[in-house]
Image: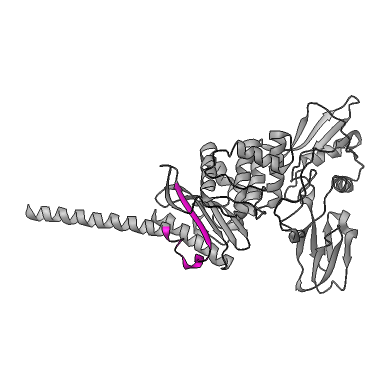
């Protein structure tokens, strides 16, 4: 009996030690990010939330504000899932007294975009081009968001915003042996070539003030490049006419009062959201935010749309953010990790898990390419990056089956982007293994 009692005592002590060790190890894993010397001089916020208990497993500066970069697309994604129908509205139309079509564009970013071969709106124009008039949209927005970097005007990730987006509002230049293929071809004569193109060592830039492009010598081999063009409704109509090879009537006169508009649907909403989140597409994010305004307010002024969203869908955020755009390009945006946890948790409770997993990138896909290679299906996140700012927020499933929500925001670091991303990968992988 004495031996049995001693045996039981030893088992009890061993179990206490075992569980104590496990708890300590898990807590060490949760707190390891903030103590990483890589972030000694950076501004860091880390929040890990367990929705099953509605409690934070770890929260370090989760109520502090950070520049979120493209993590802000989580806000846009949630608002789009709440507001937009199963497929985007590509065009509104009605018949006037003469049985002619009056049409107006919706701001749909997929119109003649190379991502999509099926183009229902273009098909509508092909069928009715000689019996319709395009009327100007109620456009009140600026071509750039507040706080965007002006000197990124020729970067493919910052197309202008417009009421009639077309071809992604960019010109694509592609080297084909000794030639440069320009799409849309309408811009072909806008390209000036300086020097010999046979070596393939050149670059293409756009004039800041107009849609004139220059091919100049470079030390690197040119492959391809997307460059935003300066937009206008009239230019979009010209581009449509050039593709359609037919004239289109257009007026900016207010000739329609209260009418019943019919809709032409373009692309599945979730397909567009998936591209937006996986590629971190700024153009899709910004135009979708404007489309949300069209649906909710019949309004295309970005500031008014954001104010409405903050007073409706986002009114119960833990901390009210400074929210300036739909993509996160603006350095004026300020959001807390707790805000992202709140939005992601709302998304989780209001929408099917399979839908969310289909939209968010998982391991080694999209902007996670090269990261979390062994965690495909275990982690679903949105990345974000601006110079000196890296963000990562989303969902993870631990090896024990626990579903967690997390947000990691790092601002003002002076380390390499690769080193920061690797630290995030190690941190989250450790949590998946140990919790």
What residue do we see at 86% from left, 73% from top?
196
Question: Can residue 84 be seen here?
Answer: yes
Farthest residue, direction left: 1
In percent of width and height, residue 219 lies at 76, 75
- Pick the front one: 338 or 245: 338
Q: Quadrant of residue 343?
A: top right
Query: At 81% from the left edge and 41% from the top edge, which residue is drawn?
Result: 122
- Count up the numbered dots: 0
Q: How is the image coloured?
A: one colour
Q: Is residue 38 magenta?
A: yes
Q: Looking at the picture, how far across and down is residue 383, in whole percent?
A: 58, 55
Q: Can you give x and y, in whole percent of width and height, for residue 346 in the image?
A: 53, 40
Looking at the image, which residue sits at the far top?
Answer: 97
Quadrant in the rendering for residue 121: top right
- Above or below, 147 against 95 in this view is below
Taking depth in this image into account, of 102 and 113 the one nearest to the observer is 102
Q: Is residue 61 left or right of residue 116?
A: left
The answer to whether residue 267 is visible is no
- In the image, taking residue 305 as reference, residue 355 lies left or right, namely left
Of 430 and 196, nearer the camera is: 430
Quarter of the rendering containing residue 228: bottom right
Identify the residue shown where x is 51% and y is 38%: 349
Q: Is residue 423 above or below residue 101?
A: below
Estimate the x, y position of residue 201 in percent, counting from the top left: 79, 73
Range of the magenta residues? 31-49
Q: Residue at x 48, y 50 (%)?
A: 396
- 255 vs 348, left or right, is right
Q: In the image, is residue 262 part of the stretch drawn in magenta? A: no
């Amino acid at each position: 009996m004495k031996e049995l009692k001693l045996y039981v005592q030893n088992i009890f002590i061993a179990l206490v030690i075992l569980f104590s060790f496990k708890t300590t190890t898990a807590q060490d894993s949760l707190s390891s990010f903030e103590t990483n010397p890589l972030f000694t001089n950076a501004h860091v916020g880390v929040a890990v939330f367990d929705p099953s208990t509605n409690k934070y497993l770890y929260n370090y500066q989760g109520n502090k504000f950070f520049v979120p970069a493209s993590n802000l697309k989580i806000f846009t994604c949630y608002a789009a899932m709440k507001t937009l129908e199963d497929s985007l509205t590509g065009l509104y139309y009605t018949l006037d007294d003469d049985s002619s079509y009056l049409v107006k564009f919706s701001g749909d970013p997929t119109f003649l975009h190379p991502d999509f071969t099926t183009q229902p709106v273009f098909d509508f124009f092909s069928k009715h081009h000689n019996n319709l008039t395009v009327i100007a949209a109620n456009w009140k927005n600026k071509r750039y968001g507040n706080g965007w970097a002006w000197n990124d005007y020729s970067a493919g990730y910052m197309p202008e915003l417009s009421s009639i987006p077309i071809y992604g509002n960019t010109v694509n230049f592609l080297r084909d042996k000794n030639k440069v293929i320009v799409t849309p071809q309408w811009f072909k004569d806008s390209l000036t070539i300086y020097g010999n193109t046979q070596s393939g060592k050149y670059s293409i830039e756009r004039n800041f003030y107009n849609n004139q492009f220059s091919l100049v010598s470079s030390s690197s081999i040119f492959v391809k490049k997307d460059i935003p063009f300066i937009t206008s409704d009239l230019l979009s109509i010209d581009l449509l006419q050039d593709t359609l090879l037919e004239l289109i009537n257009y007026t900016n006169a207010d000739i329609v009062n209260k009418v019943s508009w019919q809709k032409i649907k373009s692309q599945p909403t979730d397909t567009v959201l998936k591209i937006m989140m996986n590629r971190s597409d700024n153009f899709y994010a910004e135009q979708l935010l404007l489309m949300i305004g069209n649906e909710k307010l019949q309004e295309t002024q970005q500031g008014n749309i954001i104010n409405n969203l903050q007073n409706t869908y986002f009114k119960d955020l833990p901390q009210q953010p400074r929210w300036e755009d739909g993509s996160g390009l603006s350095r004026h945006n300020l959001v807390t990790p707790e805000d992202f946890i709140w939005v992601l948790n709302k998304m989780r409770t209001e929408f099917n898990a399979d839908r969310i997993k289909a939209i968010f990138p998982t391991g080694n896909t999209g902007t996670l390419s090269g990261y979390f290679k062994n965690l495909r299906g275990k982690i679903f996140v949105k990345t974000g990056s601006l110079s000196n700012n890296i963000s990562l927020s989303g969902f993870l499933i631990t090896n024990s089956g626990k579903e967690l929500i997390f947000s990691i925001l790092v601002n003002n670091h002076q380390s390499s982007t690769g080193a920061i991303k690797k630290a995030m990968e190690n941190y989250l992988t450790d949590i998946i293994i140990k919790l």
